[in-house]
């Protein structure tokens, strides 16, 4: 998968596209694209997926994404903020890290889940 294609499906998943979320989680066990594995780990709240993401991460950018996701899933908010800030200086197009840094990562659910009427 190309970086552009991965960015597109990640963008769709961040936007709540249930088909993109389902595709990412289904592909996570077979893809060699570290950022897609990380996205699946974040969506499913499965830190164990990050072991494989770290193993296939071939660039420092990918390794940083894995480390930030690991810190996020470990509840280390201050570390996430610091690492994300540094990462985004060098990679301002990193949608997944901007999403994590914003605190918007939530497990997938049916459309409208978690929204209140108030």
Image (tube, grey):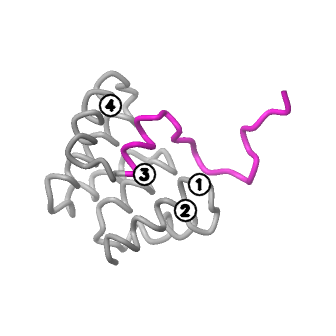
Left or right: residue 70 versus residue 18 is left
Q: In the rendered structure, which segment of residues is drawn in magenta? A: 95-118
Please name the residue that numbered disc 2 is placed on: 12
**Residue 101 at x, y = what percent?**
40, 35
Q: Callout 4: 10 Å neighbours few (<14), some, many (20+)?
A: many
Quarter of the image where one finds residue 76:
top left
Which disc is residue 80 wearing?
Answer: 4
Marks 1 and 4: in contact by CB < 8 Å?
Answer: no
| Dot placed on the residue nearer the N-terminal end, 4 or 3 | 3
Q: Secondary structure at mark 4?
A: helix
Q: Residue at x 33, y 53 (%)?
A: 93
State the CA–CA distance, disc 4 to disc 3.
16 Å
Assign the magenta stretch its main secondary structure.
loop
| Of the pair 56 and 77, the residue shown nearer to us | 77
Left or right: residue 77 versus residue 64 is right
Can you say which quadrant of the picture contains the C terminus? top right
| Dot placed on the residue nearer the N-terminal end, 4 or 2 | 2
């Amino acid at each position: 998968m190309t970086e552009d294609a991965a960015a597109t499906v990640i963008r769709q998943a961040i936007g709540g596209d249930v088909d993109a979320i389902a595709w990412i989680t289904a592909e996570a066990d077979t893809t060699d694209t570290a950022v897609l594995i990380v996205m699946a780990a974040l969506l499913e709240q499965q830190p164990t997926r990050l072991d494989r993401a770290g193993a296939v991460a071939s660039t420092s950018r990918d390794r940083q994404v894995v480390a930030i996701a690991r810190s996020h899933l470990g509840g280390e908010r201050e570390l996430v903020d610091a690492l994300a800030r540094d990462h985004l200086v060098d990679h301002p197009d990193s949608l997944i890290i901007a999403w994590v840094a914003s605190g918007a990562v939530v497990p997938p659910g049916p459309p409208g889940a978690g929204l209140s009427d108030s």
